[in-house]
Amino acid sequence: MNTLFPIFVKAENLHTLIVGGGYVGLEKLTALLGNSPEARITLVAPEIRDEIQKLAQQHPKLQLIQEPYHPIYLSDKDLVIVGTNNRTVNHQIQADCKSQRILVNVADTPDLCDFYLSSVVKKGDLKIAISTNGKSPTFAKRFREVLEEILPDSLQETLDNLTAIRTKLKGDFVQKMEKLNEITKVLR
Ligand SMILES: C[C@@]1(CC(=O)O)C2=NC(=C\c3[nH]c(c(CCC(=O)O)c3CC(=O)O)Cc3[nH]c(c(CC(=O)O)c3CCC(=O)O)/C=C3\N/C(=C\2)[C@@H](CCC(=O)O)[C@]3(C)CC(=O)O)/[C@H]1CCC(=O)O
Ligand SMILES: NC(=O)c1ccc[n+]([C@@H]2O[C@H](COP(=O)([O-])OP(=O)(O)OC[C@H]3O[C@@H](n4cnc5c(N)ncnc54)[C@H](O)[C@@H]3O)[C@@H](O)[C@H]2O)c1
C-alpha cells in the first residue's frame, strides 16, 4: 500500500537548505527552482558546481555557502534536502533534522526521507505530481513524459474559463458546486 500523503507546498513561504553542491545538489535545486523560482534556498557545500553558481546569479533568493555542513545551518530552516557524497555526513544531517523536527529528504535514500521529490507535469496552472512509492523513479519520469505529450496546451484556456465562471457564480456554496459539477461533466 502506498501511504504517502501528497501536498503542494508554497516553497516561497519556506526557507529550504540543500546540503551538497554536486550533481545531486544541482538536480534537486533545479527541481525546486523550476517549480518555485522565488523560493528562499540556502545551499551549503565545500565544492559547488559552476551551474549552481550561475543559478545563484539569476536567483537573488538563492544563497550559497562554500563550507562543509554544520548544524548551525539548520537554524531557521523549514525543509532540508541532503545530497553529499559522504554517507556518514548524510546520516548525521538526517539525525540533526529529526531532533529539530525539520522535514528532511536524503536524495536516493528512501529510509532516511520524511518526504520524496516527485516527477512533475506542468501545463499552465495544472500541475500533476507523480510518485511510484519509490518503486521506480524512472517510471515516474517516463510517465511524466507521456502526460506532457498528451495533455493539450488548451487546458489553460479551460481553467481560465472555469475560473471566470467560478467568480461570477451566485448562490451558496452547494449551488455553486452543483453548477460547476454540471458544467465540467463533459470533461469525464
Ligand atoms: C522523481 C524524481 C524527482 C527528483 O529526484 O527530482 C526522483 N528520482 C528521479 C530520477 C531518478 N532517480 C534515480 C534514477 C536512476 C534510475 C533508477 O534507479 O531508477 C532516476 C532516473 C533518471 O534520472 O533518469 C536514482 C534513484 N532514486 C532513488 C533511489 C534509491 C532507491 O530507489 O532505493 C535511486 C537509486 C540510486 C542508486 O542506484 O544508488 C530514490 C528516490 N528518487 C525519487 C525521486 C524518490 C522516489 C520517487 C517515486 O516515488 O517514484 C526517492 C525515493 C527519494 C528522493 O530522492 O526523493 C526524479 C525524476 C524526475 C523527472 O525527470 O521527472
Ligand atoms: N549523480 C547521480 O545521479 C547519483 C545517482 C545515485 C546516487 N548518487 C549518490 O549521491 C551522492 C552525491 O552524488 P553527486 O553526484 O552529487 O556527487 P558529487 O561528487 O558531484 O558532489 C558531492 C557534493 O557533496 C559535497 N560535500 C561533501 N562533503 C560535504 C559536507 N561535509 N558538507 C556539505 N557538503 C559536502 C561536495 O562538496 C560536493 O558538492 C553520491 O554518494 C552518489 O554516489 C548520485
Image: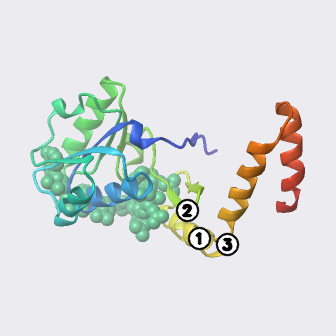
Q: Amino acid at mark 1?
A: Glu
Counting from the top left corner in percent of width and height, residue 46 is at: 10, 51
Identify the residue at image location x=35%, y=30%: 102
Counting from the top left corner in percent of width and height, residue 172 is at: 85, 30
Between 183 and 167, the one nearer to me in the picture: 167
Mark 1 element type: helix
Say which mark, if any, is on residue 152: 3
Mark 2 element type: strand
Q: Is residue 70 left or right of residue 96?
A: left
Q: Amino acid at mark 2?
A: Lys
In which quadrant will I find the C terminus? bottom right
Toward which corner of the image does residue 139 lie, by quadrant? bottom right
Mark 3 element type: loop
Distance (Cα) linking label 2 and label 1: 7 Å
Counting from the top left corner in percent of width and height, residue 65 is at: 14, 46
Task: Specify the quarter for ligand 1.
Answer: bottom left
The residue indicated by pointer 1 is 148
Say which mark, if any, is on residue 113: none
Above or below residue 78? Residue 23 is below
Distance (Cα) linking label 3 and label 2: 11 Å
First of labels 3, 2 by sequence position: 2
Distance (Cα) linking label 3 and label 1: 8 Å
